[in-house]
Image (cartoon, helix red, strand yellow):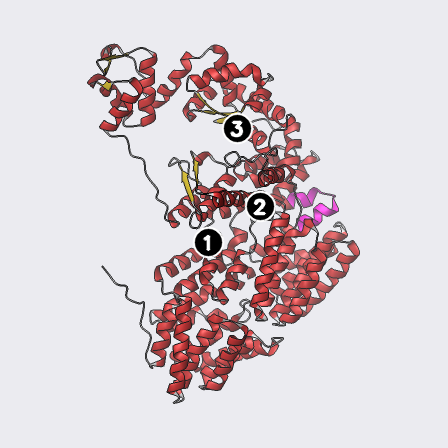
């Protein structure tokens, strides 16, 4: 995709030159949150370039043989497939059925979901074969020629190659416009596509063939400059051989790059060199290309092309480039890194650093590099590296759901003399989070966070200070003191401001700020904060942004279509998630499927609800973060059950909402009015009482009174049949601009008013509720509201017209 879009440092277009510079200057990072890889930021920039091209007029992009494309190019393709919904863009890709990878499968899924046709190319019919032959040989093909062409079984490339071979051997005669083979029985024709393609090689000079054999080492596509480096000859000396190969249709020229016309031609040339010699040549090519300034990917592909011996130069190269190549080209980088680590002797001083590189990369990808971490900790004497590995070790325990082990590891690390002061402070900051979220020891966790701030300031480490402040934000949010939480997050943002090395933490803190503003009923301010996110992402070329937080804000603001568009970045980006590794994305995926499922349930789209719930069932539910992000899923499942008349099952789905220890950060009050409504329908006073108790507890802690207080008014009004309390909730939602909850509260108010004998007032509330539901596209709640007001159970899914 970089070549397709003309990405070059010398490009006259500043945007293209900037992307090339991003690739060149990409540096490894030891950000504990996993920052430092520029790949996804580059993907965003490439998509932006295409958007600008489309702004100038309709655009067609064609990518051939994408089964061989690197993973980053496939990410670009998948993102552009999503963009076709709104851009004047025709995107065409071709690929073979094999190989199949997770990233390719993700691309296929996105194309299908976007309604893009997927065409299976069938063999040419007899008439089409005859037409193709006529264009090649210059006459209507006779029966003998057609008989030979039958061997191609309708493969157009094979038909063309077979015809060209017959012409080269002068076996075709054209008489009176009719083309026929001279003597069918004596004609020797290629018996397979492979032999037809390689038949061309017999007509090349020995010098050209030798150049092509070396070019085959570079893959199906190569730059003339790289071939020059391989052969140690100037490009000018190679041009005659390349031009001869192009004339023979062995190569296709594309500026200063060439492609083998078919992978089989390249494979035949490659196989003509013995495996032993190829191994030596690949190793030699890697070093020569590196010295000449070739890209990391180009060098790495030489090292993985055959079992190159891992010598001192290879080890040094991997130490310098291993992290970046594993991020930018994980399909080759990770395997290469693992092989080098396994071969490097343990008494080699570079072994521990190489193993640390592997551990770091695996950690960033969400895996569990326990063996690698253990090996580094046993050998290293570097206090910073030891601290980093202790951090990763603790996170491994957390990812496995072993909170106690994680806390123990961090307590040991925070006081370990072999760890630097910087990493002691960082581990203590992480310890605060795990004490609170894992052990629910919030008083101890707050003291630990304050101590980490002090240690971080003494060590001069802004990361430790800001991360500990973020922990305090978390604890105040759990206590529902959102004003105090906002003060902590703003203090943390001041610490990380203008520090490029902490850009990923900066982004996380802005996410926290949006959360606090939402809970203070400041949705407009949350929108402004999300604008600051976009500025930060552009400034530091960060991948993505905060699509999940943006989608949630859109949900509560009633902008559901906008929210679904943001969610599509997450739920449909199969290639991106395969590229990154899924484990760390699990909480985000749970929440994204939950929001999408809830919108679908409210819109009465049962198929879409089922699809999202099924996708969520495939995700792990191991960590605190997983549980914190499943509440929209629970509500979607409950709505679907209620719509089908399964009230008891709806209440079962919402049971975690009634257990504050299940996920302390969960904003359970936003779902408790629904619990009360369903419990009253199920005649379950104990559940009503439990919901009231929990909501009252949340409201009593909320500072200042906002969402929880309004939810309590709804709960009490429903439980006690008191229109006045529900009316206060309606007034609150109307005042702060919460259209979703306003419609729900109006529905509740209509029902309570009708029960109190004030039917006229109830009808007015119902009319407004239905009108607001319809504005949201919430077909199911609109139908439910009418049914509840009439004192009957709501019907199931709306019947769609047929025919």
- Report the residue at 64% width, 46% height from top: 374
- Report the residue at 74% width, 50% height from top: 419
Percent from the top left, x then y, of residue 586? 51, 55
Return the residue at label 1. Answer: 568
Gap in Å between the C-alphas at discs 3 and 1?
A: 37 Å
- Report the residue at 32% width, 27% height from top: 156
Percent from the top left, x then y, of residue 448? 71, 64
Secondary structure found at label 2: helix
Camera sees residue 79: yes
Percent from the top left, x then y, of residue 497? 70, 55
Gap in Å between the C-alphas at discs 2 and 3?
A: 28 Å
Q: Which tag is nearer the camera, tag 2 or tag 3?
A: 2
Say above or below: 234 vs 487.
above
Return the residue at label 3. Answer: 305
Q: Which badge, 3 or 1, comes first in the chain's sequence?
A: 3
Which is more toward the observer, 688 or 228? 228
Give me the disc on residue 171. Answer: none
What's the magenta region? 374-390
Q: Which badge, 2 or 1, comes first in the chain's sequence?
A: 2
Camera sees residue 411: no
Residue contact at pointers 2 and 1, CB within 8 angstroms:
no
Give me the disc on residue 41. Answer: 2
Which is more toward the observer, 473 or 438? 473
């Amino acid at each position: 995709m970089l070549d397709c879009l003309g990405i070059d440092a010398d490009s006259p277009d500043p945007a293209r030159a900037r992307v090339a510079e991003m690739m060149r200057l990409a540096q490894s990072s030891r950000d504990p949150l996993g920052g430092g890889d520029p790949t996804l930021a580059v993907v965003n920039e490439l998509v932006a370039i295409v958007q600008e091209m489309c702004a100038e007029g309709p655009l067609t992009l064609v990518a051939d043989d994408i089964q061989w494309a690197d993973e980053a190019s496939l990410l670009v393709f998948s993102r552009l497939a999503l963009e076709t919904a709104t851009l004047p863009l025709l995107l065409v890709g071709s690929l073979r059925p094999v190989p199949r990878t997770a990233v390719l499968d993700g691309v296929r899924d996105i194309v299908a979901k976007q309604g893009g046709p997927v065409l299976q190319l069938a063999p040419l019919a007899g008439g089409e074969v005859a037409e193709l032959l006529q264009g090649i040989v210059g006459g209507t093909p006779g029966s003998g020629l057609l008989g030979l062409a039958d061997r191609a079984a309708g493969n157009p490339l094979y038909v063309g190659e077979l015809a060209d071979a017959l012409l080269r051997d002068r076996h075709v005669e054209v008489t009176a416009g009719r083309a026929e083979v001279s003597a069918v029985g004596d004609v020797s024709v290629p018996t397979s596509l492979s032999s037809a393609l390689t038949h061309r090689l017999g007509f090349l000079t020995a010098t050209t063939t030798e150049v092509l054999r070396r070019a085959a080492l570079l893959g199906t596509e190569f730059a003339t400059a790289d071939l020059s480096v391989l052969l140690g000859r100037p490009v000018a000396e190679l041009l005659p051989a390349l031009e001869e190969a192009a004339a023979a249709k062995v190569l296709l020229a594309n500026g200063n790059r060439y492609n083998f016309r078919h992978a089989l031609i390249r494979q035949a040339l490659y196989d003509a060199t013995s495996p032993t010699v190829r191994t030596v040549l690949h190793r030699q090519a890697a070093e020569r290309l590196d010295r000449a300034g070739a890209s990391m990917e180009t060098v790495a592909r030489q090292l993985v092309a055959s079992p190159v011996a891992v010598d001192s130069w290879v080890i040094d190269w991997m130490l310098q480039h291993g992290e970046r190549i594993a991020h930018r080209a994980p399909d080759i980088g990770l395997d290469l890194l693992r092989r080098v680590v396994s071969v490097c002797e343990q008494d080699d001083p570079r072994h521990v650093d190489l193993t640390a590189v592997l551990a770091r990369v695996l950690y960033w990808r969400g895996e569990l590099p326990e063996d690698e971490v253990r090996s580094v900790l046993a050998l290293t004497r570097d206090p910073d590296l030891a601290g980093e590995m202790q951090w990763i070790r603790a996170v491994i325990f957390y990812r496995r759901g072993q909170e106690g082990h994680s806390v123990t590891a961090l307590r040991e690390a925070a006081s370990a003399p072999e760890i630097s002061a910087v990493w002691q402070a960082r581990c203590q900051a992480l310890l605060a989070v795990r004490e609170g979220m894992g052990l629910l020891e919030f008083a101890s966790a707050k003291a630990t966070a304050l101590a980490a701030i002090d240690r971080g300031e003494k060590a001069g480490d802004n990361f430790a200070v800001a991360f500990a402040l973020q922990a305090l934000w978390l604890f105040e949010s759990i206590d529902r003191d959102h004003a105090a939480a906002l003060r902590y997050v703003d203090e943390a943002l001041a610490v990380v401001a203008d520090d490029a090395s902490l850009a990923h933490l900066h982004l996380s803190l802005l996410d926290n700020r949006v959360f606090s503003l939402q809970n203070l009923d400041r949705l407009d301010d949350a929108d402004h904060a999300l604008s600051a996110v976009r500025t930060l992402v552009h400034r530091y070329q960060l991948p993505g942004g905060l699509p999940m937080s943006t989608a949630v804000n859109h949900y509560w603001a009633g902008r559901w279509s906008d929210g679904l568009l943001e969610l599509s970045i997450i739920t449909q980006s199969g290639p991106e998630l395969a590229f990154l590794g899924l484990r760390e994305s699990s909480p985000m995926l749970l929440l994204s499927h939950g929001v999408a499922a809830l919108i679908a349930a409210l819109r009465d789209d049962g198929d879409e609800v089922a699809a999202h719930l099924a996708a969520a069932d495939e995700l792990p539910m191991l960590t605190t973060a997983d549980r914190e992000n499943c509440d929209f899923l629970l509500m979607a499942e409950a709505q679907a059950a209620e719509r089908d008349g399964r009230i008891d099952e709806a209440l079962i789905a919402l049971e975690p909402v009634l257990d504050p220890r299940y996920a302390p950060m969960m904003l359970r009050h936003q779902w408790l009015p629904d619990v009360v409504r369903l419990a009253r329908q199920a005649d379950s006073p104990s559940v009503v009482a439990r919901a009231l108790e929990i909501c009252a507890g949340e409201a009593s802690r909320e500072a200042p009174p906002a969402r929880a207080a309004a939810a309590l008014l709804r709960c009490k009004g429903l439980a006690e049949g008191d229109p006045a309390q529900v009316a206060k909730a309606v007034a609150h939602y109307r005042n702060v601009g919460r259209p979703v909850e306003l419609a729900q509260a109006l529905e509740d108010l209509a029902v309570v008013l009708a029960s109190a004998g004030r039917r006229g007032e109830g009808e007015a509330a119902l009319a407004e509720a239905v009108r607001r539901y319809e504005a949201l596209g919430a077909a199911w709640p609109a139908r439910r509201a009418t049914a509840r007001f009439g004192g009957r159970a709501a019907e199931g899914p709306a019947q769609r017209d047929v025919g």
